Image: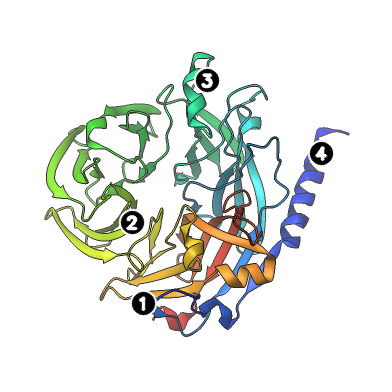
């Protein structure tokens, strides 16, 4: 069989398989309050339309395979949504990137990392894509990450180069390796300044801030580990300064014009107050973020003021990603990223910026179990379309087992949530 025929068969089978695993939910059950959950929030009056595609059929190379999504996706200028998953393995580990086309409702795999880098099965691999996917000048940029951290030191001695930065050209559909920009390190969190063409990463284990110039294809700055912790999120201000927090929640920022880091007196609110999630900057320069404990806050970088906005949902829960609507009226997020979402019905929250109202637009857990025999768990990936009408997400999950051995990882799902117009006026 020639290579062209193999590619045609692969694309056809993937397209058919995705359609067979498509699930639509739009019933009032999406708004039903889960048993044991106290009403300390609003619930939408009209249910959304939820489209799901279970990413079944993923290779199970060994018992360590645990397919999951760990980094935020990208809604690109071509109108398509890009997302990534990985098998969470160390040796032989691999990750895929997918493209979802809303115009036809299709999902297809476009990048196989192991193939792109010519990885051997015996090599220590790239079992995660943990940092966000970013678009810059018609290309997607994303970094690989390791799946088994305890094996990294040994792998480096054997030649493992750490996280790799890759570029995917949206026009040619070809992937290119830009190299290990911080050799031996992992790159679990990122942020793009599109105005300057600067891509920011944390380099762990130390936690240095790495500033990569996409136009020069060179590292501009590396350092500042003493000012960082958790290494999952940056705050990008309108003036191009990048903010981050240390283990005590104290904020500092990198100034690209001075190419240096400055300390501030600002401290994030609450306990476990390291920085975990943030939305894009508002038109008036404010940044809404979230701590590891699930406390919302508002940062004004110019005035250097910080406002505690309280728990994100109930008493506060670990949340990995949040998104600001195009009209800047709402922030959306799904609390309970690492699996705890299932305890409260896997809610998707709409936070109203003007008054702090928290409204559940869907409780996904029980309707999805009933329709697909699938336990939908936590979320590390959420973007919104240009109209503010549809949330594009990836949720981790697993086939529903109904007992104490229930997994919340192993079978990721693509989820598109169409928010009724009446719920976003």
First in sequence: mark 2 vs mark 3: 3
Residue 130's place in the image compared with 215, above or below, is below
Measured as percent of width and height from the top left, residue 256 is found at 23, 37
Quadrant location of residue 218? top left
Cα–Cα span, label 1 and label 4: 52 Å
Measured as percent of width and height from the top left, residue 293 is found at 32, 55
Secondary structure of the residue carrying tag 4 is helix
Q: Quadrant of the N terminus?
A: top right
Quadrant location of residue 351? bottom left
Residue 20's place in the image compared with 301, above or below, is below
Question: Depth-wise, is mark 1 or mark 2 nearer the camera?
Answer: 1
First in sequence: mark 3 vs mark 1: 1
Q: Can residue 182 be seen in this snapshot?
A: yes
Residue 155's disc is 3
Q: Which residue has dot 4 on it?
A: 6
Q: Are marks 3 and 1 in contact (CB under 8 Å)?
A: no
First in sequence: mark 4 vs mark 3: 4
Q: Which residue has dot 1 on it?
A: 41
Cα–Cα span, label 2 and label 3: 36 Å
Q: Determine the residue located farthest toward the front in the rendered image.
A: 404
């Amino acid at each position: 069989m020639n290579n062209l025929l193999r590619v045609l068969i692969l694309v056809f089978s993937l397209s058919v398989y995705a359609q067979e695993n498509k699930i639509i939910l739009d019933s009032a059950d999406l708004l039903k309050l889960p048993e044991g959950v106290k009403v300390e929030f609003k619930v939408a009056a009209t249910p959304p339309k939820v489209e799901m595609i279970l990413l079944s059929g993923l290779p199970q190379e060994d018992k360590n395979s645990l397919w999951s999504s760990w980094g935020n996706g990208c809604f690109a200028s071509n109108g398509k949504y890009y997302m990534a998953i990985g098998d969470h393995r160390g040796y032989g580990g691999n990750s895929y990137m997918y493209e979802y086309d809303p115009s036809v409702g299709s999902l297809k795999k476009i990048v196989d990392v192991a193939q792109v880098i010519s990885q051997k099965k015996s090599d220590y691999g790239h079992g995660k894509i943990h940092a966000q996917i970013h678009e810059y000048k018609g290309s997607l940029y994303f970094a690989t990450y390791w799946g088994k951290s305890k094996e990294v030191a040994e792998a480096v001695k054997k030649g493992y180069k750490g996280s790799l930065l890759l570029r995917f050209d949206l026009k040619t559909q070809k992937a290119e390796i830009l190299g290990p920009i911080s050799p031996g390190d992992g790159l679990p969190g990122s942020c793009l300044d599109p105005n300057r063409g600067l891509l920011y990463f944390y380099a762990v284990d130390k936690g240095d801030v790495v500033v990569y110039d996409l136009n020069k294809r060179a590292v501009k700055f590396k350092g500042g580990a003493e000012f960082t912790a958790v290494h999952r999120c940056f705050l990008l201000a309108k003036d191009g300064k990048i903010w981050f927090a240390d283990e005590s929640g104290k904020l500092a920022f990198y100034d690209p014009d001075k190419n240096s880091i400055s300390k501030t007196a600002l401290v994030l609110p609450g306990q476990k107050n390291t920085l975990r999630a943030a939305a894009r900057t508002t038109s008036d320069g404010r940044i809404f973020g979230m701590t590891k404990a699930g406390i919302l806050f508002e940062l004004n970088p110019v005035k250097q003021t910080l406002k505690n906005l309280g728990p994100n949902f109930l008493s506060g829960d670990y949340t990995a990603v949040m998104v600001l609507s195009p009209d800047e009226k709402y922030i959306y997020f799904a609390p309970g990223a690492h699996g705890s979402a299932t305890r409260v019905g896997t809610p998707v929250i709409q936070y109203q910026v003007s008054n702090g109202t928290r409204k559940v637009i869907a409780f996904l857990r029980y309707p999805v179990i009933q329709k697909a025999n699938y336990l939908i768990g936590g979320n590390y990936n959420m973007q919104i379309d240009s109209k503010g009408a549809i949330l594009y997400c990836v949720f981790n999950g697993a086939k529903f087992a109904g007992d104490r051995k229930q997994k919340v990882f192993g079978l990721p799902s693509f989820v598109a949530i169409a928010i009724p117009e009446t719920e976003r006026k």
